Amino acid sequence: MKQVIVVLLALAFAISPALSSSDRGKVGIGIVLGAPSGFSVKYWESQRVAYQGSIGGMFHGGLMIGGDYLVHENALRYQQVPFYYGAGIFLGDAGLGGPDYSHGKLALGIRAAFGLNYVPREYPFDVAIELGPSLLLTPTVGMGVLLSVAFRFYP
């Protein structure tokens, strides 16, 4: 339980400068469902580049925290639905490769992120669906896929 509190406090201190910024609408706060299921934050550096972070529980239990660098492209016909890709890192109980070697143990891994982000111009929210092929580096090497849906509000 102490580890969960420490991780939550570290995340709060990490995002507090972005939330206190005078650039309203650049930081989205919400939930993510899937792997992981929990809290999501996204900071838009520009119309093309964004950073996202998440903290939440995994299917087999355990807590995972991760962060990604994302690049958005207007690859589709609709500008309100950009395709994005990027790379990230995660720490926690990933549960990749089955519970035999990673469940209940601290894991470190890297991942790719591919998704679609619905960003309506007239409303302050977004919805994203994301696929993340992942490589577990510790406690052993393993591969997996993280799939999630995020809902964020931009105050």
Image (spheres, rainbow, N blue to C red):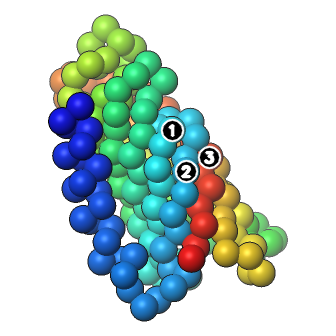
The secondary element bearing badge 2 is classed as strand
Q: Residues within 10 Å of mark 1 (few under 14, many from 20)?
A: many
Question: Mark 3 and mark 2 in contact (Cβ < 8 Å)?
Answer: no
Which residue is rendered at x = 67% and y = 75% of the image? 124
Q: Amino acid at mark 2?
A: Ile
What number is the disc on residue 31?
2
What number is the disc on residue 37?
1
The secondary element bearing badge 1 is classed as strand
Q: Circle 3 sits on which residue?
A: 149
Judged by depth in the image, the label closer to the viewer, 3 or 1, is 1
> Splitting the image into 4 quarters, where does residue 80 fall?
bottom right
Nearer-N-terminus badge (2/1) = 2
Give x and y (percent) for residue 16: 31, 71
Can residue 130 be seen here? The reply is: no
> Splitting the image into 4 quarters, where does residue 47 fall?
bottom right
Q: Amino acid at mark 1?
A: Ser
Instruction: Tell me: residue 69, above or below residue 150.
Output: below
Q: Residues within 10 Å of mark 3 (few under 14, many from 20)?
A: some
Quadrant showing the C terminus: bottom right
- The front one of 11 and 138 is 11
Give x and y (percent) for residue 52: 43, 61
Q: Amino acid at mark 3?
A: Val
Question: Mark 1 and mark 2 in contact (Cβ < 8 Å)?
Answer: yes
Give x and y (percent) for residue 22: 42, 91
- The front one of 96 and 150 is 150
Q: Residues within 10 Å of mark 2 (few under 14, many from 20)?
A: many
Cα gap from disc 2 to disc 1, whole angstroms: 7 Å
